[in-house]
Image (cartoon, rainbow, N blue to C red):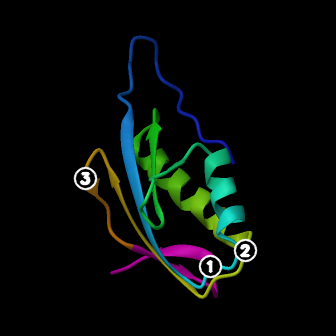
Amino acid sequence: MNYFKVVPLGDKLENIELVVILEVENLKDKEKFEKHLKKEGFKIVPEEEFVYTGISSTTTFSTKAYILEVFKKGLQKTEFDSCNMVFLLNETPYPPYTYDKTTNDFEEVK
């Protein structure tokens, strides 16, 4: 799924720097998972386990939706026991998420 933002003439969006940190238990095929993330524009942070970065030129709302969708699709390409996620957009932390295997989607942790 591609995300884009229609910007009125004269408006300029700032780039959003993002960091995504996962806690994944028993991921069966990390190579396939990370290949998907790379294809979607994420970079692997060297020497860090399950930490990814990227740059977005859309709104924070669209960026958040894109992160959740890309990581959901990546997890669906392999087997795993559980996954928790936190991410920062321009150093602003967002609420944690956990992957719900009954709905096959990320749910915000309340």
Mark 2 crowdedness (10 Å alpha carbons): few <14, some 14-19, many ≥20:
some
Q: Amino acid at mark 1?
A: Leu
Q: Please report the residue visible at 68 percent of the width from the left and 55 percent of the height from the top.
A: 36
When asked about the image quadrant of residue 90, the answer is top left
Which residue matches tag 2?
78
> Could you tell which of marks 3 and 1 lies nearer the N-terminus?
1
**Residue 23: x, y in percent?**
45, 76
Q: CA distance from mark 3 to mark 1?
A: 28 Å
Q: CA distance from mark 3 to mark 2?
A: 30 Å
Q: Amino acid at mark 2?
A: Thr
Q: Amino acid at mark 3?
A: Thr
Mark 3 crowdedness (10 Å alpha carbons): few <14, some 14-19, many ≥20:
few
**Mark 3 or mark 1, which is nearer to you?**
1
The magenta span reads 97-110
**Residue 97: x, y in percent?**
43, 73
Q: Please report the residue visible at 60 percent of the width from the left and 59 percent of the height from the top.
A: 69
Which residue matches tag 3?
92
**Residue 62: x, y in percent?**
48, 46
Determine the residue located farthest toward the left in the rendered image: 92
> Could you tell which of marks 1 and 2 lies nearer the N-terminus?
1
When asked about the image quadrant of residue 88, the answer is bottom left
When asked about the image quadrant of residue 80, the answer is bottom right
**Mark 3 or mark 2, which is nearer to you?**
2
Q: How many marks?
A: 3
Q: Is residue 105 magenta?
A: yes
Above or below, comparing residue 55 to residue 26 in the picture: above
**Mark 2 secondary-structure assignment:** loop
